[in-house]
Structure formats: C-alpha cells, structure tokens
C-alpha cells in the first residue's frame, strides 16, 4: 500500500490502483469497502459525476426508481485518485471516469475513512479533517 502524502491544503491518499470490493447502501450511510481493507463511510451529501463535467451530478441519496445500480457499478473499479481536502471535502476518481464527491457538512461528519489498523480520517462538522490514530 502506498503511503498518504500530506500537502498544504490536502492529503493524497495512497489508494491508487486499489479495487472497490463492495458498495452497500444502508438507511443513512453508504459503505465503500476497498481491497486494501480500508472502508469509506459516507453519511453526508455525495454526488457522482466526472472530473470535467459542468452538468449537475447525480445525488447518490436520491436515486430514482430503476437506478438501483447507481452505486453498484463502482464495484470492481480501480481507484485512480483519492484526495481529502483540509476543508473536509473528499474526492474519489475511479477507473471508469466516475468521480465521487463528498463536501464537508455544516452539522455532521460527512464521511470517514477507516484503515485496517483502526486509524481514521474524519470530515468534521463545519469543515476540517481529524486524523485519529489506531489503538496501540
């Protein structure tokens, strides 16, 4: 696994070429499980689109009838880029060109990324990111 790289305004996560193993939608969250053991939990607004689209993106929480596979098509794709901005936003770009965006939420933790060692990155309510170390 490639190490995460911290820059002034973001972290480039070491997820390049990691495969999306599963995507599950529960009542108030989406779980994206990656082949390296990390799990991305999304509990805030999230959209699907592409990096270069200027059109409105698909809100993953408001899938219409017949769009049950809105998230299922992510399974098996490779991560091309995973960026956590220090504002609390997250962007995940996959091999199909799909871009998952999760902005920070004013009142809730919009997402969290859990690692196999128990450490986490968490989007804080109102913006910002917390790094939580795993248990010793």
Image: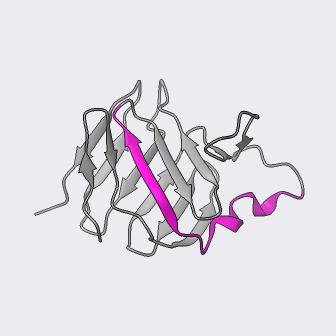
Q: Residue at x 49, y 61 (%)?
A: 80
The reply, left or right, for residue 2 in relation to residue 123 is left
Which residue is depicted at the point 54% across and 54% down?
93
Quarter of the image for the C terminus: give it: bottom left
Pick out the residue farthest to the front: 52
For residue 86, side relative to residue 90 (left or right): left
Residue 75 x, y percent position in the rendering? 62, 71
Which residues, given as a range, are shown in magenta? 66-86
Q: Position of residue 113 (x, y in %)?
A: 39, 54
In the foreground, 5 or 70: 5
Q: Position of residue 52 (x, y in %)?
A: 65, 41
Residue 10 within the segment the image draws in magenta = no
Comparing 72 with 28, the one in front is 72
Number of dots carrying numbers: 0
Name which residue lies at 40% across and 34% down: 88
The spot of residue 87 in percent (x, y) is 38, 29
The structure's colour scheme is one colour
Magenta span includes 69: yes
Give me the residue at 75% from left, 34% from top.
Answer: 56
């Amino acid at each position: 696994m490639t190490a995460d790289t911290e820059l002034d305004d973001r972290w480039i996560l070491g997820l390049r070429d990691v495969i999306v193993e599963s995507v599950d939608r529960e009542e108030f969250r989406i779980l994206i499980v990656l082949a390296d053991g990390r799990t991305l939990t999304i509990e805030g607004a999230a959209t699907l689109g592409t990096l270069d689209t200027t059109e409105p993106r698909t809100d993953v929480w408001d899938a219409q009838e017949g769009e049950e596979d809105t998230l299922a098509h992510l399974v098996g794709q490779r991560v091309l880029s995973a960026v956590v901005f220090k504002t609390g936003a997250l962007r995940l770009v996959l091999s199909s060109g799909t871009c998952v965006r999760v902005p920070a939420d004013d009142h809730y933790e919009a997402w969290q990324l859990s690692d196999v060692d128990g450490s986490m990155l968490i989007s804080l309510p109102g913006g910002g990111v917390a790094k939580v170390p795993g248990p010793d």
